Image (tube, rainbow, N blue to C red):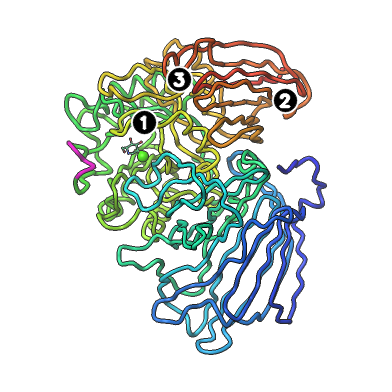
Amino acid sequence: MHNLFTIPLFLLLSVLLVTAQAAEPSSQQLTSPDGSIEVTVEVRDAGVYYSVQYKKQAVIQASRLGFDIQGQPQLAANLEVTDVQRNTTHQAWQQVWGERAEVVDHHNQLSISLQEREGLQRKLELVFRAFDDGIGFRYHLPQQPNLQEFAIEDELTEFALAQNYHAWWIPAYRDQRYEYQYLKSALSSIDVAHTPLTLTDDGIAIAIHEAALVDYASMTLRNVSDNHKTLKADLVPWADGTKVYAKTPLTTPWRTIQIASQAAELINSDLIVNLNEPNRLGDTSAYVKPGKYMGVWWEMHIGSKSWSPGADQGATTERVKEYIDFAAEHDIDGVLVEGWNKGWEGEWWQRKPTFIFDEPVVGFDIQAAVDYASSKGRQLVGHHETAAGIAHYEAQMERAFAYYQKLGIHSVKMGYVGTRLEGKEWHHGQFMVRHFAKVVATAAKYQVMVNAHETIKDTGLRRTYPNLMTRECVRGMEYNGGSPDTGNLPNHTVIIPFTRGLAGPTDFTPGIFNFDYQEHRPYNRVPTTLAKQLALYVTLYSPLQMAADLPENYQGHPAFQFIDDVPTDWQESRALQGEIGEFLVIARKDRHSEDWYLGATSNETPRQLSIKLDFLDAGRYQATIYRDGEQAHWRTNPEDYVIESKKVKAGQVLKLDLKPGGGAAVRLHRL
Ligand code: NOJ
Ligand code: CA
């Protein structure tokens, strides 16, 4: 955890120390600024290998690097070092929005230029960065005569893990994309996993992921060695089997390895955003606004309303006005309307898409809804469900965003429901990466914020494109509503901040207050207490947070005050305590006031937590505590909660009693 206040101002300026070496060393070392992480890169005749140590213990043993290129020999061996460059960067940069206003980027960099000794004499550069919270490395293939337009058949990058760590993972190449519950097993039992992949053991927590995934395939990790501890990059292919279509100069995404002594510390890492390019959109303040939304959504998932036009139609002008009325009485900025447009008839997810993105469904007067919202200082949130039909959507995309801009709609939720894009492409290959880049650029052109479901995983591009607010890419609340395979387990929400959450903001959609929704869903339920639903607004980070329940379930409910109060943009965030799958405590300071908020969540095990309030600033705070009642239990009595108030100050210990599947949410208002 960087403490910004202890860094002298002169160090916040970028320091660039460059030394060039002409020699041909076979081994190069790189160390993190605090010395805890060491990377070694060895260039042998047989290939190029890197290894990583943390506090003098091996984490990654010598692991291969290189490529298989279609129609050419492997680009991996017989390389000689032609240049080595080193530099150090220490600077702070401001986030447009985020978990903290200011991010410190302090790293040492090693760049190694390589060239094949004979044959095609292709050139390859490796760039490694070592931070105190992990490392990143990537390949750069410069422009060169024997490598111009080409296809990557395989990326050879390996992660030869030093131990058979505990792994927290979801399987890759499955029909539900990233929407699985996490498995906990030995690393050796992984077949092929998505990233972030989190690994733990006593005194160490590791997360393997990637940063800045641009015009390339996403990386999954496949277990390849006899001892089952070596994971290999397995790039999600195109339908024709090619991994990446490329041309030089090519810079790959960063392969990232976050390392900390405890799992909760991984949540405090800024490595992924630090490895992305600065904001390219300039001043987005006219439309990029973190905030809260609600909308016509949960009622479809619990089966009382439908996306289809007709008697059960959820999107009606009247219903949307009810949401707007509630939003206007509270601190809720946007109202989402799913099923607002033409084309949702029947089983829309089973057929080729029929959506029209600039015509409202009969029964929903979008202009009247927009006007009504605006008269109450609120905005509609648009919705583009593509049902994975990319060509159908792209043909209308420009018009669709222009339509929203004309209506004054500055926020859209996207969806890519389907097992394959266009019926054949994976959701996570270069095809989707390219498509989604177009979406984000088009949205920016028409001043729209993006919240995407079922899209490619987050790799920190929000830094470069601050209109890319949040995404699902997780098994969200929806599975407690409409899914046929009955919901999530109570430990799910104390796993995902340590896994999926490391990639970036998560549109999980918390805030269910009514647990009695089984009329159409006899086997489903929300596996938490009500107090834990509140805590999720702090423990699951997203700059756009949904209040997912229906307005009538919130009406007159004293606990809604927490959702009203909780901000979605932060000055500072600190994961204080936690163990994956067990519990988590996070404190965050509002970006626009002196108030702090704290969320504590447990799995099905009750537990007493003592939380030192040493993160508070000087002075006194009024603590409003929303906690589980004495009889609270996620299965039998989720709605039992208590609101308490007391004065506290920095350094005191706050004791919280979490019931099974429970939690606590605390507002600390500066007096
Ligand atoms: C899947 C999304 O995750 C969900 O939130 C949405 O309601 C449906 N798609 C329909 O677009
Ligand atoms: Ca989904």
Q: How many marks?
A: 3
Earlier in the chain: of badge 1 and badge 3, it is 1
Quadrant holding the N terminus? top right
How far across and how far down the image is residue 317, in percent?
A: 28, 25
Residue 210, relative to residue 27: is it above or below? above
Q: Quadrant of ligand 2?
A: top left
Q: Which residue is mark 1?
A: 487
Pointers 2 and 1 in contact (CB under 8 A)? no
Earlier in the chain: of badge 2 and badge 1, it is 1
How far across and how far down the image is residue 176, in percent?
A: 34, 45
Secondary structure under tag 1 reads loop
Secondary structure under tag 3 reads loop
Secondary structure under tag 2 reads strand
Q: Which residue is mark 3?
A: 634
Using residue 220 as the reference point, say whether residue 623 is left or right of it: right
Q: Is residue 264 magenta?
A: no
Q: Which mark is residue 612?
A: 2
| In the foreground, 390 or 447 | 390
Residue 135, relative to residue 551: is it above or below? below
Q: Crowding at label 2, few (<14), some or many (≥20) Cα neighbours within 10 Å?
A: some
Residue 440 can be seen, yes or no: yes
Residue 355, relative to residue 18: is it above or below? above
Stretch of the chain drawn in magenta = 346-350
How far across and how far down the image is residue 463, in percent?
A: 56, 50
Pointers 1 and 3 in contact (CB under 8 A)? no
* Name of the residue lying farthest toward the bottom: 118
- Marks 2/1: CA distance? 34 Å
